[in-house]
Amino acid sequence: MTEPLRLLFVDDDADIRAIVTLSLGLDRAIVPVAVGTAEEALAAVRTGSGFDAALLDVTMPVMDGPALFRMLRAIVPGLPVIFMTAHSRDHEVAALRAAGAVGVIVKPFEPLTLAAQVRALLA
């Protein structure tokens, strides 16, 4: 049996965290760990929680997703990161990919297919 995918999910919106956690939980091979701030995400990674990938909201207060991405990569080089954003202009998506993200999921997303989308981007 394959180990489950431990996925760190960071979004400042509690409702989005709940929906994403529920959506990803539909795939029993994904273990989502949701936090609401970049600081909580950094603390979770520093405790050695063994995340396989991260799903980051782009727009958050205090520290945005791209800044968090750079800090996560300094702690865990090569950590696959997917961004989630409502900003879907081609140049915005291209900039996130150019920064090293493995993919971008645009909000609003389809909850029933979110886990499959995440798996496809990580494949």
Image (spheres, grey):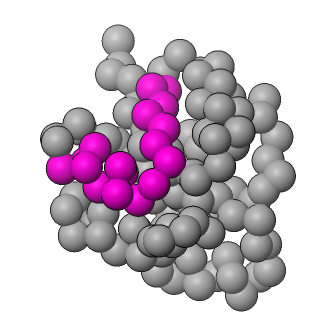
- Tell me which residue sits at (69%, 43%) in the image: 16
Looking at the picture, tell me which residue is in the foreground, 121 or 19: 19
- Tell me which residue sits at (75%, 60%) in the image: 106
Relative to 112, is 105 above or below?
below
Q: Is residue 16 magenta?
A: no
The reply to whether residue 116 is in sight is: no
Q: How many marks?
A: 0
Residue 58 placement: quadrant: bottom right
Query: Where residue 115 sits: x, y (%)?
Result: 63, 34
Query: Where residue 6 sits: x, y (%)?
Result: 38, 33
Residue 114 placement: quadrant: top right
Query: Where residue 56 sits: x, y (%)?
Result: 52, 57
Instruction: Provide the residue span drawn in magenta.
Output: 30-46
Query: What is the quadrant of the N terminus in the image?
Result: top left
Query: Where residue 93 sits: x, y (%)?
Result: 67, 76
Looking at the picture, tell me which residue is in the foreground, 35 or 86: 35
Q: Is residue 39 magenta?
A: yes
Relative to 70, is 72 above or below?
above
- Tell me which residue sits at (29%, 70%) in the image: 71
* Residue situated furthest front in the rendering: 62
Residue 50 as seen in the image, left or right of residue 93: left
